Amino acid sequence: MCLILFAINQHPELPLVVAANRDEYYQRPTDPMHWWSEQEVLAGRDRESGGTWLAISPQGEVAAVTNFRDGRPEKAAISRGQLPLWALEQSTTELGDALQQSRGKLAGFNLICVDSKSGWYFSNRDPHPGRNLHRGAYGLSNHLLQSPWPKLVTLRKRLTERLQQIAQPSLHERLIADMQDTAPAPDLYLPDTGVGLETERFLSSPFIKSEHYGTRATTIITVAATGDIRVTEQSWEQWGAPGKRQTFQWQRQPFSD
């Protein structure tokens, strides 16, 4: 994933809302979102590494990972695609210990694990890794959580506005449209992550499209206070052409205090 927006307890009927774009090379082999047989999660699969970028449990927990862009070499013994799977299998204490022990075996990453009440964030580029998250609207791209990159700030504000305007059924459609924003950031506000100005400019829009690299999927997740869980995955082809759209919906037990 390269852009994740999520809101915890920012709407009385929707305690968890997640909107995410996954950016990747179009040629990288990928399976669309599906229920896995070997682990009870709903997730797409990166067929090159075997992992995933975003996974959802039957209880509505969401775990997702992004790369950390800092110009350092990306070779690693463990694929970052394993991290969302670990996050849905382990407690945050166990996971934090495992991630601390594996810091040297992983390229730069950000990992979030959220549900309708709270969340947890870990980055091996964070000087104080392992942070508890509470109610609020958050954004994550290829730097630390809430780093004020223009696309993060813009889409986080838009998510907050949408939650004040729209009921759940139409929210997915509106958020998918919002996540297709192709406006680049002004050069003045671009970060310097060691990839050069032209590439920074190319990567600065929420939705990226080109011949070889771009946004491959937009995923919207809502978990309602009634226990209704809805997931929409919109796939994208080269130059941002719409691909397959999938929807999933199921019911879990109502949340209790």
Image: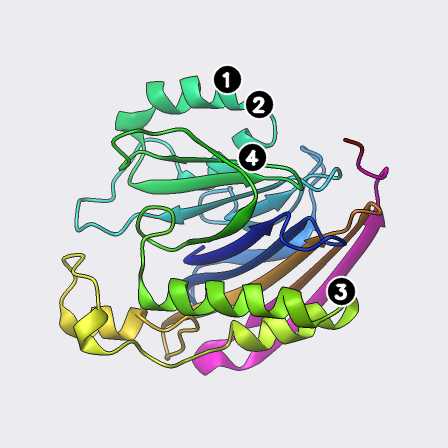
Identified by mark 4, the residue type is: Leu
In this rendering, which labeled residue sits more in front, label 4 or label 2? Answer: 2
Instruction: Identify the mark nearer the N-term, 1 or 4.
Output: 4
On screen, residue 215 versus residue 197, left or right, reads right
Q: State how far apart marks 2 and 1 are (Cα).
A: 6 Å
Instruction: Identify the mark nearer the N-term, 1 or 3.
Output: 1
Task: From the image, tell me which residue sits under label 4.
Answer: 85
Identified by mark 1, the residue type is: Glu
Q: Secondary structure at mark 2?
A: loop
Task: From the image, tell me which residue sits under label 1.
Answer: 94
On screen, residue 105 versus residue 232, left or right, reads left
Task: From the image, tell me which residue sits under label 2.
Answer: 90
Give the vertical position of 230 relative to 74 (above or below). Answer: below
Q: Secondary structure at mark 4?
A: helix
Q: State how far apart marks 4 and 3 are (Cα).
A: 27 Å
- The residue positioned 57% from the left and 21% from the top of the image is 91
Q: Are marks 2 and 1 in contact (CB under 8 Å)?
A: yes
